[in-house]
Image: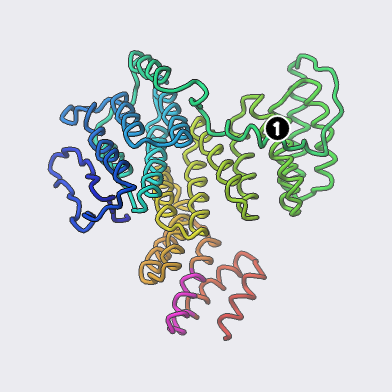
Amino acid sequence: MYPGVYPAYIKPYTPQIKHKPVEKVSKDSENPNKPEQNQNLEDSNSSASQAFQSAIDYKAEKFSLGQILTDFRSTLNAIGAPPEIEEEVAGYLQLIERQAKKPNPSQAIIKSNLKSSAVILDDYITQTLNRNSKVVTNWVGAVLMQQIDYSLPLSDIEKTEERLSIEQKPQEITALQQEKLAQIQNKQETNNIQPPTSEHKTASKVDNIKVKNFYTRFEELVDSGSYAKAISEAKKVLNYAQKIDDKNTQAKVYLNVAHIFDEKNNLTQAIKGYNKAAQLAKAGGDKETQAKAHYNMASIYDDVGKIEPALQHYHAALALDGETENIKGQAQTLNSIGNIFTVKNEHKKALNYYKVAFSLAKDQGDKTGQASILSNVAGVFRDLGIDKKALDYYKQAIQLDTEAGNASGCAKSYEQAGNIMLKNGKTDKAKSLYSKSLSLSQQLGDKSWSARMAEKIDH
């Protein structure tokens, strides 16, 4: 979707694909006047590009996943990435290995984590050379077009573990990015609805039924917007769940209570609740709830402009969604990370994240997710002043949202496209698009949106 521009003297590897031409690098991407301070990295990245070819037999009928991972780690070593980058990429690669150990490995999970790792490495290369790099991303894309054996033989796993124990210190190997958040989590206080402690007892079948019924009642109150009653009911559920040491139910209660505070814009209490939910879910082994808690904390930090904790929590959610095979969740999180870099005017980095997110959403057939991502891509090109391309992406987003029945998404894209038309002096076309947005907002019963569109049309 986006043209690849490679750093100087880094040649992309394109495997031999039957009946398809080999894509060449434009000479315009080469720069003979390279800054001396980047010479070592560029030399190492030339080695990195060659490392892709070192282990894999690209003429074989099927590629071995173990060989691909070996090449990836060779590249990591070749470019001399700092420990924090190595740790982050190692987390994704270990998730891949864990998935490959299963009887029927999920290709979607393995592909998504390979793509995420590639984006991280390309971001590091781009920042260091101050030139856009997609060499790793394009290599992964080319490899994934081939036939791959996604299972990882035990011998390959043992070799990988042995290599890791030699090449890295134990403290540098982390399977999940959320471990980075330990210090943050330890500093945060627990929610103010903490029930009194009591002795635990072994849960019986009757106990489990009771706590499930209590929780169902609590969840219904939350869903209906009866927040005061829900908070009162939450204390009862927590008290009973604690008695039988049901950490997963406690985690879900804290998640919902945090959502209530979030809705009321009480962000301090919301963060405390989400953090408590993440801690309990981790103790109970509920990675799905844990991922939701981290994502929601990230969203809050994102909204208030605290970028670093937002990115930390987003990456924690990404890793957890990778373990639970939640591809849709990964796409959503990558989209949100892309939004952060859009706001920071780091447009190339934003587009990299959007590209991976869109690929995952498309693999899942998630048209609403695809539309959201394309709308954000349109926003990047709008900010860059490339209006024609922005309008094209808004058009694609509207088509996908229409097919998915997402009137809200369509209304937003119509308004944004109308703003571009208005900026370019095409008033009639702008008002036509505003009218479509108005019609949809009225169908949704959104009075505030309808009023804004009506005002734009009248002016």
Which of the image's four quarters has the N terminus? bottom left
| Horizontal arrangement in the rendering, residue 229 relative to residue 381 (left or right) | right
Q: Quadrant of residue 221?
A: top right
Q: Main secondary structure of the magenta part?
A: helix
Q: Nearer the viewer, residue 48 or 234?
A: 48
Q: Which residues are magenta?
A: 414-430
Residue 155 horizontal/vertical position (percent):
33, 13
Residue 290 horizontal/vertical position (percent):
62, 34
Where is 107 relative to 342, above or below? above
Which secondary structure, mark 1? helix
Residue 151 horizontal/vertical position (percent):
34, 22
Residue matched to label 1: 186
Q: Nearer the viewer, residue 395 or 189?
A: 189
Q: Residue furthest front?
A: 36
Q: Quadrant of residue 249?
A: top right
Query: Given the image, on which type of amino acid does mark 1 rest?
Result: Asn
